[in-house]
Amino acid sequence: MNKAVIASIVAGGMWGNIVAPSVPPAMAQSLPSVQPTATTPNPIGIELLDAGAEPRRELKFTPAINSKQTMTMTMDMSMEMTIGETPIPKTPLPKMVLNVDSTVKRVDPSGDIHCQFAYSDLQAIGNPDTAPELLAAIQKSLKSLVGIKLDMVIGGNGQVKSKKLIIPKTVDPKLKNLLEQFDRSMSDLSTQLPTERVGLGAKWRINNSIKISGINLVQSATSEIVEIDNMGVKIKTQMTQSAPPQDLNIPGTTPDVKSRLTSMASSGEGSYLLRFNSLLPVTGKFAAKTDSKLSVQSGSKEPPTDMSTKISIDLDFDSK
C-alpha cells in the first residue's frame, strides 16, 4: 500500500479519536457487544495555588431537581500534515454543531447531584472544500450518538463520583471509539472546583494522567477566577497535554503496519462562565493546538516514514 495512504489512515484513526471527539476515526474497531457500563472514576486532586482576594466563599453547584439545560457547542478544526518531506496542504474540516442536554434527577442531602447528559442534536456543516462523501460519513456517525445517555453522580464541587453509559439497542456495536469519546467528552463537561473558600483571582491546578484510545497522556490545567458574585464565576483556563514515545494501535491499519508516536504536545486556553444553579457552562470559548510526530512502517523490509501533524481547534459554547 502507498505510504501516503497508510500515513493518512494513521492520522485519521489517531487524531479523530484524540483531538476531535465527534470526528469518526478512519475505520472503527469491532465491538462484540454493547452493554450499559458503570464506572467509578479515580478522584482528581486539585492543587490550590492562590485563594484569591477577600471576601472568599465556598463554590458549590446547587441546581434544582428536574432543572434542564441545553448547551450548543460549535467546533471549527483544521489539520495540516507532512509525510516524509512532502507537505500536505492545510485542510479545514467540517464545522461541528453539537447540542448537549442536561437534566438534574436528584440532589442528595450531602449535595451530590444525580444527573443525566445526552446529545440531542449533532450536525456537520461542510465548506466548499469538503468532499461530499466525507461530510456524509461524519454526519452519519454523529447521528448515531443521538439517544445515548450518560448518568452521572457529581459532587457539589463538580467532582465526578460515578457514571453509567446507557446505550440503546439500536446503536451500531461497531462504534466503539465514538462511544468512548462520548463518555469522555460528557465527563469533561463537569467542572471541578476547589473545596476551599476562594475569591477573585483564586488559582488552582489539576494534573492527571489519562488514557485515550490506548494512548497515554499527561494533562495539566490551570484555572483562575476573573469574575465572581453570588450567582456564579467566570474562569480563565490554560491547558497542556503531552505524551511520551509509545507504540500505537491505530484502527483501520493492517497488522503489518507498525506505528509509533515519537512526540506530542498540546496547548490551549479559554474562558467560560458558570452559574451555580446549572451544571453546564453558560457561555465560553476555547482554542487549542496540537503538534505531533509519528513513525509509520509498513512491513519489516520497508523503511519507516516520519509524519508530523498539526491540528487547530476553536470551540464556542452557549447555553439556555
Image (spheres, helix red, strand yellow):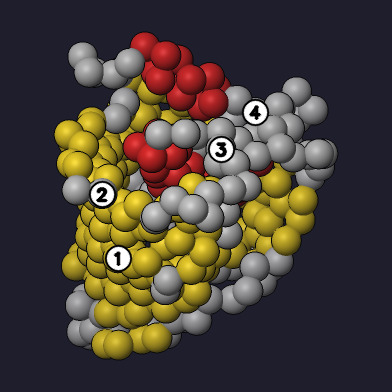
The residues tagged by marks 2 and 4 sit, at their Cα atoms, a distance apart of 42 Å
Q: Earlier in the sequence, mark 1 or mark 2?
A: 2
- State the residue position of label 1: 265
Dot 4 lies on which element?
loop
Dot 2 lies on which element?
loop
The residues tagged by marks 1 and 3 sit, at their Cα atoms, a distance apart of 24 Å
Q: Position of residue 39 (x, y in %)?
A: 73, 61
Frontmost residue, 246 versus 38? 246
Left or right, 171 with reference to 236: right
Where residue 147 is drawn, which disc sits there? 4
Left or right, 211 with reference to 81: right
Frontmost residue, 311 versus 167? 311
Q: Are marks 3 and 2 in contact (CB under 8 Å)?
A: no
Q: Are marks 1 and 3 in contact (CB under 8 Å)?
A: no
Q: Tell which tag, 1 or 3, sits nearer the viewer.
A: 3
Residue in view at x 23 percent, y 32 percent: 91
In the rendered image, is residue 252 in sight?
A: yes
